[in-house]
Amino acid sequence: MARSVTPWLARLVAITCSLQLAGAEPNSRLCIKNTGGSCLTTNCYSWRESTGQVTCDVGRCFCDAGSCSGADSACYSPDREYAVLGSPNVTGNVTGTTWYTFRNARWPDLVLRTASLVTNYNIYAVASVADPSKFSLVVPPTGQGQVPSFLIYSKHWGESVLQWQRTQAGHGTAGYTISCKSIGRVSSVAMPDLLTSIVVAPMPQGDGSPLFMLKSFRDNAYVYIGMATTSMSALPVYENDPGVGGYWRIDPPLPVDVLNRLVTYSGRRCSTMCGNVATVAGAASRTYGMASVFILAISSSLLLASA
């Protein structure tokens, strides 16, 4: 007697045997198609069709018929456009876009920047402000009453966005990385992995204006500059409050209507070597200290090699 095949296995076999890699539309700068939902063992659910349409393609839920994914992984019709902050239009033309910089609150001579090499996707901290350290902020539809989340695009790499990835999990812990990669790399990355949450830091600037933390949309993970970070180190990511090295000034200031919708950090606070908020004018330079750490590491290696 033939053995029965479970429904989910039959569905998986059917999907595997009918791969149509070109079936789903690819992501674009102002329209992310991959919702992050899975239809390997279930359907895409009707709630994803908020005002748009959803389709199952190779086990993944994509927005269809001109609709685009919101931050809530539901599909929205074209009239629910992605908002480019500071831009007079949302046509995808970057001419009118406001370019933002993220300056560190502990070491204000350093700004966030992407790599300048096509083979490197890391995020660094450097002293110079140039195209790799400028970003545009795009806000997808959020659903009713939700806090805005952001697609943070590089000016240097026009179709590349900050992405968060969980690198390992086990024993109740996980590691994370942040990078800047193409939105279409590896067959359309899912919306939740492309989104960054901007959170108001628990400590303000000296004049009372807010500082901000850059957080993974999925996880409680924040990018920061560490004491041992050098100019050639990819920036680390830390669970919970990483201290002032993880607080950032955003220039120019965010629009008031966006700022008023952000949430303030409310998790476990940093308790050791947290640092202080420095003023931009006359601040001690971190660049020399970073270079010293690197030179010291080289010198130590040479001494060990000659011993």
Image (cartoon, rainbow, N blue to C red):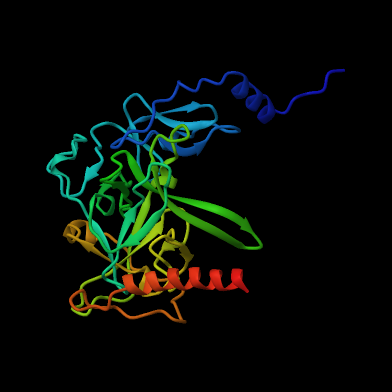
Where is residue 122 shown, x and y percent of the image? 42, 52
Where is residue 284 shown, x and y percent of the image? 27, 78
Side (left or right) of 139 relative to 27: left
- Please name whichever residue, 37 or 97, is drawn nearer the observer in this view of the structure: 97
Q: From the viewer's perspective, is residue 58 above or below residue 282?
A: above
Of all residues shown, which one is farthest toward the front?
306
Q: From the viewer's perspective, is residue 275 above or below residue 190?
A: below
Q: Is residue 241 visible?
A: no
What count of labels does the image hold? 0
Q: Locate residue 266: give its quadrant.
A: bottom left
Where is residue 97 shown, x and y percent of the image? 17, 45
| Residue drawn at (51%, 57%) of the image | 176
| Residue drawn at (34%, 48%) of the image | 116
Q: Is residue 247 visible?
A: yes
- Please name whichever residue, 298 or 213, is drawn nearer the observer in this view of the structure: 298
Indicate the quadrant containing the C terminus: top left, top right, bottom left or bottom right. Answer: bottom right
- Please name whichever residue, 36 or 287, is drawn nearer the observer in this view of the structure: 287
| Residue drawn at (49%, 27%) of the image | 56
- Please name whichever residue, 267 or 46, is drawn nearer the observer in this view of the structure: 267
Side (left or right) of 270 relative to 5: left
Of all residues shown, which one is farthest toward the right?
1
Indicate the quadrant containing the N terminus: top left, top right, bottom left or bottom right. Answer: top right
Q: Locate residue 77: give its quadrant.
A: top left
Where is residue 192 shown, x and y percent of the image? 43, 46
| Residue drawn at (54%, 32%) of the image | 39
